[in-house]
Amino acid sequence: MSDASAPAVNGAGTAAIYERVVASLPGLCLAYDVQGALLAWNDALEVAAGLTRDELGARTLSELLPEAASALLAVGTRSGVAPPRGATPGVLRLDLVTRQGRRLALEGTVSPITAGGRVVGGVLLALDLREAQRRREQIVRVERLRALNELASGISHNFNNRLTVILGRAQLAARTARDEDLQADLEAIARAARQSADLVQRLQSSTACWEDRRGLPCVDINTLVREEAERARTAWRVPPQASAPEIRIHEDLADVAQPKGLADALRQVLQHMLDNARDAMPAGGTITLSTRQQGHWLLLRVSDTGEGMTEEVRRRAFDPLFTTKGPQSAGLGLSTAYGIVARHGGDIEIESIPGRGATFTVRLPTGGAPHPALPERPVAGGGQRILVVDDEGEICQMLTRLLEGEGYRVAVALDGQTALALCAAEGFDLVITELGMPDMSGWELADTLRRQCPDTRVLLMSGWELDVDGERLGQYNVHEVLHKPFEIRTLLDAVSRCLAASA
């Protein structure tokens, strides 16, 4: 909240009251006197206008709201007499002039400040229409993502289970295959399984709704922007003798606070937006990367001078599988970027006019302290007792063959109750369990084992994309989480780490 050093209305005490009232109101708030001097305003008005406290205090009502100033000064009646008690303030459409000279469309109401039965000023309470529209669009996108996430999660879980069997069997067969053609065929199968797994993961990422950012490290966005700009310049560099169109990248970075998040995920967002900007400029052009601080939000803008987009394309740009690039595109780049930003508590806004380029603005909440990196896990050998728990029999068969081939002694359970009975009767060094099973989830099994067999380590497998912090893993005595489908080497390394930690 700011209070300018303009003449107070009816004394300093009353001005202080106005200041507190204005500070408590939502939206953009401004108090002024009948001469058009600005008396008090809230932080939201400073942010919207792009002006500092001192700069805003030096402006008049007619400079800030030129077309609406006369209407605002005529609040009450034109003779300056206060309106009757209970009168309904009218709704005004007005334009706020920002530092850059841009006009920001507002909708608001104005109420009079009275003293001795006369109007001596007014209080404007307004809403940024573009911000309101942005929030409505954000709500629609988030709800759409939630619905798609429920559908994608079920499909992905089942699909990843099948891919686990395909990839695992192909890699097991390749270990003993002697024929070169057979080796090549098995590698082609494994490669297709990996590509399919990547597509599933991208679909999950594009629809996920992750909201808890506690414990995440801070990300230096400016450093990330510089690195990705240099990567793109190198990758897109056109040889002097080539006739290909040139794409230039400019950076305009300000001092900004650091958002909490995952650097690799936010890097992926920037990569998707850079690629999208490049594709929008087939004849070449300029991409501008800029960062700004807006209150408690960091703004990262990616602007291009390309073809722009229609309103229909702009509205659907973040929909999974939507693309204007033809069959060569999966239509997941921008939807993946939006899903990542949404999971960081942010939003992406698009401004575009056909033929005049586009600007993508990423909004991320800022704050938080650096988070220490986790220590590396030790590696251990095999030979111990392992129980594999999964309601998919083919996965159990594949894992049994793999682990026994490495010298482990393996037992199998197709459900949680059987697993608990086997653990009580025989005892195991490690339990590898699926997360989603009909009778008992992997978390429930791990929690029961924590109480009944505290020395048994648990390795959790899941066909769903999970964001699990170390604290929750420790609570359930789960040592690691392995996402399906996985490489044979990845599984064996995880098993070694789990067994080493229990030694």
Image (cartoon, rainbow, N blue to C red):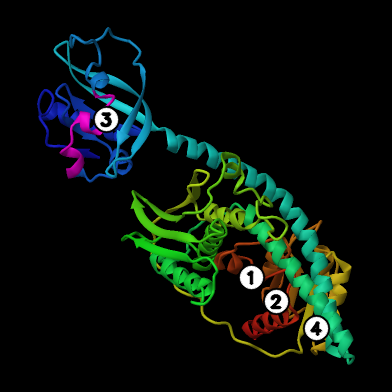
- Stretch of the chain drawn in magenta: 54-69
Tell me the amino acid under the disc marked 4: Leu
Query: What percent of the width, then of the height, locates residue 172?
Result: 84, 83
Locate the C terminus and report the quarter of the image it occupies.
Answer: bottom right
Above-or-below relation of 59 to 220: above
Q: Which mark is residue 477?
A: 1
- Residue 411 in sight: no
Nearest to the eye among marks 4 and 2: give it. Answer: 4
For the point 83% across and 71% down, the residue is 165
Q: Nearer the viewer, residue 375 or 244?
A: 244
Hey, which residue is sitting farthest top in the picture?
Answer: 84
| Callouts 1 and 2 close, C-beta under 8 Å | yes
The residue that mark 3 highlights is: 65
Q: Which mark is residue 230?
A: none
Of callouts 4 and 3, the N-terminal one: 3
- The quadrant in which residue 41 appears is top left
Is residue 14 left or right of 494 when viewed as pictured? left
Tell me the amino acid under the disc marked 3: Leu
Of callouts 1 and 2, the N-terminal one: 2
Tell me the amino acid under the disc marked 2: Thr
Q: Does residue 60 belong to the magenta stretch?
A: yes
The residue that mark 4 highlights is: 403
Mark-to-mark CA distance, 4 and 2: 17 Å
Mark-to-mark CA distance, 1 and 4: 22 Å
Of callouts 3 and 1, the N-terminal one: 3
The residue that mark 2 highlights is: 456
Query: What percent of the width, then of the height, locates residue 45?
Result: 30, 38
Nearest to the eye among marks 1 and 4: give it. Answer: 4
Locate the N terminus and report the quarter of the image it occupies.
Answer: top left
Of callouts 4 and 2, the N-terminal one: 4
